[in-house]
């Protein structure tokens, strides 16, 4: 099912999206901001990745789409644990740098959380960010994540060890954000 937010639509990853994701994955500035890392991804690698991905009961991937700009990024959930109602965030990213800071990642998270908490009946989403990724930490805290700890020097980037901030968002944290901001006012989705 597609998920409709206030600014974005979350839909399945289509073949037309994969070059945007490949270019971003190969961008050193992008890799410097994320916890993970990758060897360079060729068009052939990317096509093979696309041929093999599918949403399943433990992993959900969405392309973030806007009316004006089409596919602009990605968000999702991984390691969904149905017994405990816990999942982890998967790769929040807005690939088109010129349209960052317009609230798209915030809306993508709010939209995904509404589905995760209200439809999938999850109770908690785990997240993490590099300590210097202030934008990511700001977005996460805005949508309800709380800092739960720091893994010291957990990630090696650009010649130095970096702390990894561990985050968690409970259903009640998300609901408090919705109530405080009237986020879904006039929205029946
Ligand atoms: C992190 C990312 C997804 C945010 O996307 P976005 O669409 O620009 O996010 P939003 O517009 O919803 O929110 C950005 C917020 O950061 C704030 N911000 C901008 N620069 C900032 C800074 N230097 N420090 C702190 N906050 C900052 C903006 O003001 C905005 O907050 P506001 O709405 O309260 O004013 C995007 O920057 C990105 O793709 N980065 C590269 C990948 C990445 O870092 N992913 C996260 C991995 S954990």
Image: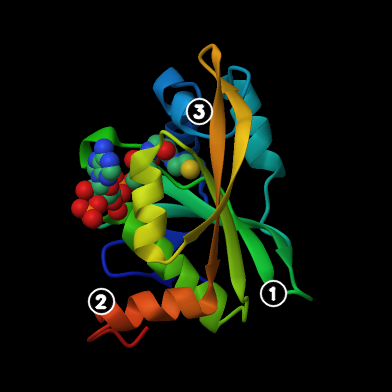
Q: Position of residue 99 (x, y in %)?
A: 23, 42
Q: Quadrant of residue 56?
A: bottom right
> Is the residue 103 above or below the residue 72 in the image?
below
Q: Quadrant of residue 167?
A: bottom right
Sort mark 1 into few (<14), some (14-19) or many (20+) by Cα contacts within 10 Å: some
Q: Position of residue 93 (x, y in %)?
A: 42, 43
Q: Residue at x 75, y 74 (%)?
A: 84
Residue corresponding to mark 2: 181
Q: Residue at x 51, y 14 (%)?
A: 158
143 lies left or right of 163: left
Q: Residue at x 26, y 63 (%)?
A: 7
Q: Secondary structure at mark 2?
A: helix
**In this rendering, the label closer to the viewer, 1 or 3:** 1
Residue corresponding to mark 3: 25
Sort mark 2 into few (<14), some (14-19) or many (20+) by Cα contacts within 10 Å: few
Sort mark 3 into few (<14), some (14-19) or many (20+) by Cα contacts within 10 Å: some
Which of 122/132 is in front? 132
**In this rendering, the label closer to the viewer, 2 or 3:** 2
Dividing the image into four quarters, tell me where ligand 1 lies.
top left
Which of 185/158 is in front? 158
As drawn, the label of residue 85 is 1
């Amino acid at each position: 099912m597609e998920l409709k937010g206030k600014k974005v639509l979350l839909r399945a990853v289509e073949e037309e999206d994969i070059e945007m994701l490949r270019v971003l994955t190969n961008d050193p500035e992008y890799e410097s901001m994320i916890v993970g890392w990758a060897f360079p991804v060729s068009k052939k690698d990317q096509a093979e990745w696309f041929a093999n991905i599918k949403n399943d009961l433990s992993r959900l991937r969405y392309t973030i789409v806007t009316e004006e700009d089409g596919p602009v990024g990605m968000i999702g959930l991984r390691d969904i644990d149905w017994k405990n109602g816990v999942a982890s965030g998967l790769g929040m990213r807005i690939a088109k740098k010129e349209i960052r800071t317009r609230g798209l990642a915030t809306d993508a998270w709010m939209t995904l959380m509404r589905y995760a908490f209200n439809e999938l009946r999850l109770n908690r989403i785990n997240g993490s960010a590099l300590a210097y990724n202030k934008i990511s930490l700001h977005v996460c805290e805005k949508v309800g994540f709380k800092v739960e700890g720091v893994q010291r020097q957990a990630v090696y980037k650009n010649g130095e060890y970096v702390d990894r901030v561990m985050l968690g968002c409970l259903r009640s944290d998300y609901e408090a954000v919705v109530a405080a901001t009237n986020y879904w006012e006039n929205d029946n989705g």
